[in-house]
Amino acid sequence: MMEIGEIDARSASDDVLARFHELELVCHEELESGDPWRTRDEGIAFHRHLPQDITIGHWLADGGCAVLWMHNPTATFCEVLVHPERRRHGLGTALLERVVERARALGVETLRGDHETAAGAAFAAHFGAVDEQRIVRSLLELQTANLPEPLVPNGWHLVNWLTRVPDEHLDAYVRARVAMDDAPTPDGMEFPTWDAEKIRASEESLRLREREMRLTVAMNGAGEIGAFTELRHSAGSVLGLTDDTGTDAAHRGKGLARAVKLESLRRLRDDHPEIEAVTTRNAEENAAMRGLNQSVGFRPTVVETTAALVLGRLTAAE
């Protein structure tokens, strides 16, 4: 008989959360072999200290785990991982059923997850999930990348902030984050709008995870932020992560996104020579951002497909 326990990740012990990381590592090596992955300590901190404005759920079994992340009823995601030696015995189905049950109780309209293999696609389809967006994961070999000094248009200058957006620039950054509202997303999915409270919640989460936030912005003399990019890095890790990059609609076509991207990567390399690689993820149809990333040296490594399960009309396969 399968025993699946629900875990309170915010209070669980290191040993319990390490079991999630162990499963993530096994599956990561299967799907993205050769790419760096987060350390044990990073994995534990990730699950324990997610932002407080995200509703989470964690389930653990012998040989498998599942995680639920809810931003709102239209932007809710899950991950189901089963050790290769424990597959084909119904464990993945049992874990997903727990996630679906919780998602329905929370009023979730659509539950989404990613798959990268034929087996993952078949598992999603078995439950009636429909493929939506394709996400390209790319990697930059930081130490050997050709990163020229950025060209900054007249009237603009580059600013770097670590850990926290200064209070005097918080409102400008909130306005700049609106640039992400037109990023490609599946129909019907709407992320919560970034406001000051959400930005501070994200910063606090990263602080508790001992993860460095590195924000680079292009600012003009009026204090407007025309473009921004955020990198994240944990002490002891050889991997950096690009979070969001955006350009205000009124200031596109000036080269600001490229300038902040080059500046952030150059600074990261100078400050952390131990970092070997930086990863980023972009929607396949986001040709502008993918082209920018490739122009500075990112190379595609994995394509993930987002599958959407509409909870109001599940098939009998459930």
Image (cartoon, rainbow, N blue to C red):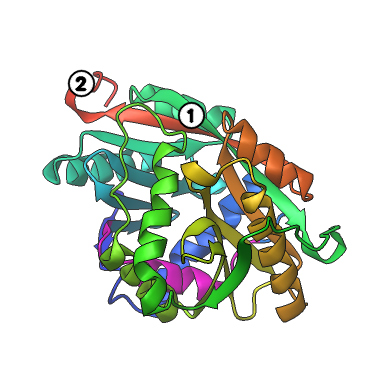
For image coordinates 43% across by 55% down, the residue present is 176
The percent position of residue 133, horizontal first and vertical second, equals: 48, 29
Q: Quadrant of residue 117?
A: top right
Residue 49 magenta-highlighted: yes
Q: Residues within 10 Å of mark 2 (few under 14, many from 20)?
A: few
Q: Nearer the viewer, mark 2 or mark 1?
A: 1
Look at the numbered disc 1 and give the secondary structure of its residue: strand
Query: Which residue position is annotated with label 2?
Result: 313
Task: Pick whichever of labels 2 and 1 is earlier in the sequence.
Answer: 1
> Horizontal and vertical percent for residue 231?
58, 64
231 falls in the magenta region:
no
Q: Which mark is residue 133?
A: 1
| Amino acid type of the residue that numbered disc 2 sits on in the rendered structure | Arg
Name above or below for residue 140 compared with residue 308: below
Horizontally, residue 149 falls left or right of residue 20, namely right
Image quarter of the C terminus: top left
Task: Kindly report the distance in space between the C-alpha atoms of the residues bearing marks 2 and 1.
Answer: 20 Å
Residue 20 in percent (x, y) is at 44, 62
Left or right, 48 with reference to 239: left
The residue under the point 71% across, 55% down is 35
From this view, report whether residue 14 is shown above or below residue 145. below
Q: Specify the segment rendered in magenta.
A: 37-56
Q: Amino acid at mark 1?
A: Gln
Q: Is residue 189 visible?
A: yes
> Which x, y percent locates residue 181?
39, 42
Q: Which mark is residue 82?
A: none
Which residue is at a point 42% across and 37% down the rendered structure image?
A: 182
Please tell me which residue is depicted at 31% across the width and 70% down the height of the picture. 201
